[in-house]
Image (spheres, grey):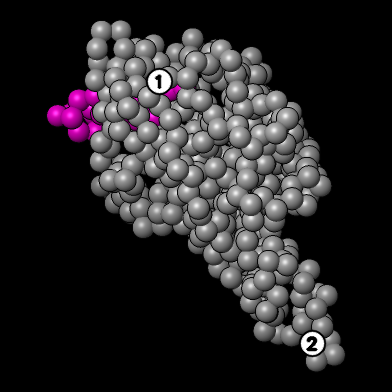
Amino acid sequence: MDDSLYFSEQHIAVRDMVREFAREEVAPVAAHFDATQEFPWANIKKMGELGLLGIPWPESLGGAGLDLLSYMIAIHEMAKVDASHGITISAHTTLGTSPIVNFGSEAQRERFVPLLASGRVLGGFGLTEPTAGSDAAGTRTTAVRKNDHYVINGNKNFITHGGVGEVFVITAVTDKALGTKGITSFILTKEADLSQRGDVDIGHEPSLAAMPGFRAGKKENKLGWRASDTRELIFEDVEVPVENRLGEEGMGFINFMQTLDSGRVGIAALSLGIAEGAFEQALNYAAGRRQFGRSIASFQGIQFQLSDMATEIEAGKHLMYHAAWLAKHKKPFGKEAAIAKLFCSELAMRSTLKAIQIHGGYGYTKDYPVERMMRDAKVCEIGEGTSEIQRIVIARHLLRGMAD
């Protein structure tokens, strides 16, 4: 892709900075954290100091004051090396912080966003439930108004940063009779699990009081993204002040659907990074690996696989950065986000499988990163809306366009 098509000199500077950090600081420890499932607190602190946890937010709110393309570049570059670090940036920024920035009151933004944008504390987004996955309208967590507060009961699952996070935007039903128009969003705070933090001084802010009854459940033992903290969130008679309601009652469903559109571009960037990282590994391995007296890169069968990977990655770049460009310029991008997410997530699986094949038996071992990349790629076809949901979203846009 011609960098000048989407990128300014500032974008190139962001790319180079993230690329250097990822390769110097993240690559050497990625396999360790994947194996141990520990959350990489020390690297998260460094990411916060570099501004990577608040890239698109204004400096007045503690952010880096950069644009959406810079943010996608950061996810893309980080995921080339390790998807777990990449999803930390994406989930924290898009899911944990953007609803407060986009739909919160001035007081809410001033209270929470500087802490999140600086990386002082981590944030998350509580939407998915045991009976409300692809059917996001099937939310069963309830919020009952009692004078100056709401009482929330229920649970969420598969929540990124569920254990290590302190600030969460969650959805709950405030009026069951209204269907999706009876779902409301709230900002909740809880105690973070800092048991593996060591002497790293982030993750907790004393001014954020944990809400009694709000806690994390078990940590998921996942196939991929193993250095990313994923847990259940549990709400047992949690009293949430009215001032922590995010927007008006009944606006939760509309707001989180907008959030998911942006999240899909982020997952497309993450998927593209995984695909490109696997391609780079395969290309380097093929150039150095010798069989039958010559480099395996000289064999047509290997060349075809590398060519297919390179071609699809180039297409994925245009799809993802085009969707990001539309979002940056406040143009409709729902269809383009779904297309980018669908294509890039499935590309990540195809590319990582090809990379393993090119590595042969070595690709099936943990001595090379391509097996981890393959495991990390799979969830990209599931999270932020499955591939099946993306196809439904795309079809709806197409049919709506015909009707118009």
Report the residue marked by disc 1.
Answer: 212
Q: Residue furthest left?
A: 177
Report the residue marked by disc 2.
Answer: 291
* Tag nearer the camera, 1 or 2: 1
Q: Which residue is drawn at 36% across and 58% down?
A: 388
Badge 1: residue crowd in 10 Å (few <14, some 14–19, many ≥20): some
- Magenta range is 170-189
Q: Quadrant of the C terminus?
A: top left
**At which x and y percent is residue 287?**
81, 74
**At which x and y percent is residue 324?**
56, 41
Could you tell which of marks 1 and 2 lies nearer the N-terminus?
Answer: 1
Q: Residue at x 49, y 15 (%)?
A: 209
Instruction: State left or right for residue 330 relative to residue 361.
Output: left
Magenta-span inclusion, residue 112: no
Whether residue 125 is visible here, answered yes or no, is: yes
Badge 2: residue crowd in 10 Å (few <14, some 14–19, many ≥20): few
Whether residue 380 is visible here, answered yes or no, is: no
Magenta-span inclusion, residue 179: yes
Q: Is residue 121 above or below residue 35?
A: above
